[in-house]
Amino acid sequence: MCIRDSLSRDWDPASGSQYQVLDALVRDALHKLRARGVHPVVRGYFWQQGEADAKDAASAGAYGHRLENFIVRTRQQLAALQATTEAAQIRFVLGQVLPSAPSGSRAHRTYPYRKSVRAAQLAVQNRLQNTVTVPTDQSFATHSSDSDGYRDDDDAHFNEAGLAKLGASMAEAYLRVDAKQKNPAPAAQGPPARSQDDSLRVITYNTYYVFGKHEQIEAGSRWLAQQRPDVVALQELTNTTNERLREIAAGWNHQHTVLLKEQGFSVGLTSREPIQVIEKWQDGMHHGCLHAFTAGTHIFVVHLSPFRWQVRAIEAEHILARVRPLLQQQLQVLVLGDCNAHSSTDLPLLQAQPDLLAKLRGSDQKHSHIENLRAGNYDFSVMQTFYEAGLADAALPFLQQARDLRWASPTGYWGPNRDAAPSNGERIDYVLASSQLANRANGAFVCRQGIVNQVSDHYPVVVDFRRKAAR
């Protein structure tokens, strides 16, 4: 794509000249091939664009919305030409633009809103199915690294080596998305068998006052032991001691534990490997936050406010103030826990159960200290803040568009039959990962069957990662 072409102008599906050219090329190619008796199926697009939008604040600020609109419209138009293809099934692989812009460089001066565009390119993969973004950094070479007399001051366009690496990375990303689409996560309560030598299994679990008010500790521990996790993030460890957490975690063979606090609603972390505590803080947080390092990963265990979206927004910024510098250093990061916040990726499923919105509206109106909705509707801004910072919803690509497979709350705990998962619910528990780590996710599920309906009012969320990038 041409560096001068803007998503706000040239690629606007409604009137953009470049978009019209693309649409005409696709239509003409399909028509000519069909006329020759060939019936191709376009499976996806590779998209590399955004430099021009990084030049001014308005274009950069609207880039995420326009990119999403571009992908949706392009899919719709292509699906209309291919009766056998559903729009959402058309793959989109994006590459981040402007891989490096050191202070004082031409790219730094020319594209002052580079970070906004790159963040939007990462965030879109959390909002649209079958969409993946290839993160780029200084290892993707541009012409300025050649010093061969050809465009030596060009630190925006990739050189031959940079293009080769980008192409290989895009191909790998496409095949990964394609494989997930052709082999979606099974309805069974667990991903395929894994090798623990090269796999990192992460579980986040709101335990409801320490596994059903301490009454289901044995059952909860037994379930966790069966999963053989490497890292477990726990919420609602209410009035628990460090010693008690160590005793409980021994039930799933974790010798390393850390607890945020021993009074009130606490969060905790357990691991197979030693844990280094980086920070514990409660200022500006409803329940507090734990930052630790284990399994080669910076892990933040969170439990955001259950009462007000405005408080959650402030909490998210406190967390991201610690997360962003780690992401800039290309370090592995996980934010795990109960965010008490909805994601726009779940909107179609939320709209399919109007009773939930009515219930939340009634709660907001009845209680003066509660405002979980924003102007009477779902608030997606908290999760969007995490996405735009560069964190990916690691479980999402593996969770099918079905409430009985995706919702993590409530469980059967409150029902007449604690063995049965309710049909309605919501997803407020997340495994958020730095982009490089998220791209190594190879399985995820929300366990909704069996004993977990008796242990807590939240289901555990499980994500498997490859510890090392595939070669």
Image (spheres, rainbow, N blue to C red):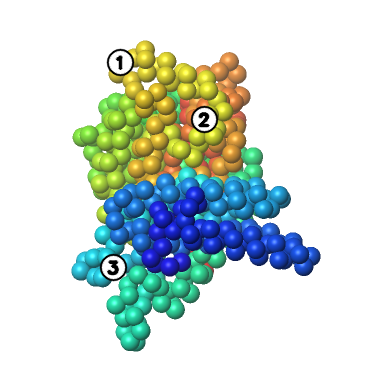
Which residue corresponds to the image point at 29% horizontal and 30% vertical from the top-left?
310
**Residue kind at label 1, given as amino acid type:** Ser
Which residue corresponds to the image point at 24% horizontal and 70% vertical from the top-left?
105
Q: Which residue is mark 2?
A: 350
Give the Cα separation between the discs numbered 1 and 3.
Answer: 50 Å
How busy is the neighbourhood of tag 2: few (under 14 within 10 Å), some, or many (20 plus)? many
Q: Which mark is residue 107?
A: 3
Residue 362, horizontal then vertical, whole percent: 42, 15
Could you tell which of marks 1 and 3 lies nearer the N-terminus? 3
Which residue is more in the foreground, 407 or 220? 407
Examine the rendering and report whether any part of residue 394 can be seen: no
**Residue kind at label 3, given as amino acid type:** Ala
Residue 41, horizontal then vertical, whole percent: 68, 59
Frontmost of labels 1 and 3 is 3
Secondary structure under tag 2 reads helix
Q: Which residue is mark 1?
A: 368
Residue 113, horizontal then vertical, whole percent: 29, 57
Which residue is more in the foreground, 63 or 30? 30
Residue 385, horizontal then vertical, whole percent: 34, 43
Lateral position of residue 99 relative to residue 396, left or right: left
Which residue is more in the foreground, 76 or 144? 76
Give the Cα separation between the discs numbered 2 and 3.
Answer: 42 Å
